[in-house]
Image: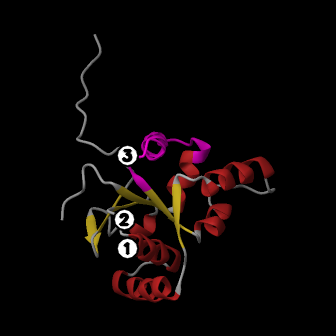
């Protein structure tokens, strides 16, 4: 299986959600994916577990209520479809954790993406570094990218 150029369904791991919401370095692909979701061109999925995980990633103490509200607003947005961590997801995650030597949280995200039927799981998480560029049960794992054919960079005169 090759990387889907124009996926119709994308699962976002927690780190792209935070980087996109906080507009950290490299957020542009996430901004475009969110725009495509708003336009109805792509379905976006997250795990309900992301509500917990985004709290700790990239958020420095002391607790910043404004950042928390921004992240909750993104997580609650209608453009995202949530995958609940059911027994089926948890059992699949256990298997992925063992089979692919993934951390528990990463395995939950992969299992959620598979159960959702997403074509691509987008993540910058280092735990997926050995799996990027491969598919697991029909889900391509890669760093966030803008759907569509690669763009050629031409120098601006």
| Residue that carries the numbered disc 3 in the rendered image | 41
* Residue stretch rendered in magenta on the structure: 21-43
User: Helix, strand or loop at disc 3?
Assistant: loop
User: Residue 12, percent across and down?
Assistant: 46, 59
Q: Is residue 33 magenta?
A: yes
* Residue nearest the viewer, comparing 113 with 80: 80
In the image, taking residue 120 as reference, residue 88 lies left or right, namely right
Residue that extends furthest to the top in the rendered view of this protein: 157
User: Residue 108, percent across and down?
Assistant: 49, 77
What residue is at 50 percent from the left and 85 percent from the top?
Answer: 90
User: Residue 80, percent across and down?
Assistant: 52, 57
Q: What is the C-alpha distance between the residues marked 1 and 3?
A: 20 Å
User: Helix, strand or loop at disc 1?
Assistant: helix
Q: What is the C-alpha distance between the residues marked 2 and 1?
A: 6 Å
In the image, taking residue 47 as reference, residue 74 lies left or right, namely right
Task: State whether residue 128 appears in this view.
Answer: yes
Q: Which quarter of the figure has residue 94?
A: bottom left
Q: Is residue 120 above or below residue 156?
A: below
Q: Is residue 104 above or below residue 149?
A: below
User: Helix, strand or loop at disc 2?
Assistant: loop
| Residue that carries the numbered disc 1 in the rendered image | 114
Q: Nearer the viewer, mark 2 or mark 3?
A: 3
Q: Nearer the viewer, mark 1 or mark 3?
A: 3
Residue that extends furthest to the left in the rendered view of this protein: 1
Are there few (<14), some (14-19), or many (20+) residues within 10 Å of tag 1?
many
| Residue that carries the numbered disc 2 in the rendered image | 118
**CB under 8 Å between callouts 2 and 1?**
yes
């Amino acid at each position: 299986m090759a990387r889907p150029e124009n996926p119709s369904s994308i699962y976002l791991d927690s780190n792209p959600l935070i980087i996109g919401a906080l507009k950290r370095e490299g957020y542009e692909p996430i901004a475009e994916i969110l725009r495509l979701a708003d336009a109805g061109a792509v379905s976006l999925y997250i795990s309900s577990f992301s509500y917990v995980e985004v709290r700790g990633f990239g958020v420095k103490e002391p607790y910043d209520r404004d950042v928390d509200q921004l992240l909750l607003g993104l997580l609650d947005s209608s453009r995202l479809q949530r995958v609940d961590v059911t027994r089926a997801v948890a059992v699949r995650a256990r298997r992925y954790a063992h089979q692919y030597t993934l951390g528990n949280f990463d395995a939950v995200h992969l299992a959620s993406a598979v159960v959702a039927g997403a074509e691509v799981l987008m993540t910058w998480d280092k735990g997926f570094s050995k799996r990027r560029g491969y598919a697991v049960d029909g889900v391509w794992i890669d760093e966030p990218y803008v759907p569509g054919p690669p763009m050629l960079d031409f120098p601006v005169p």
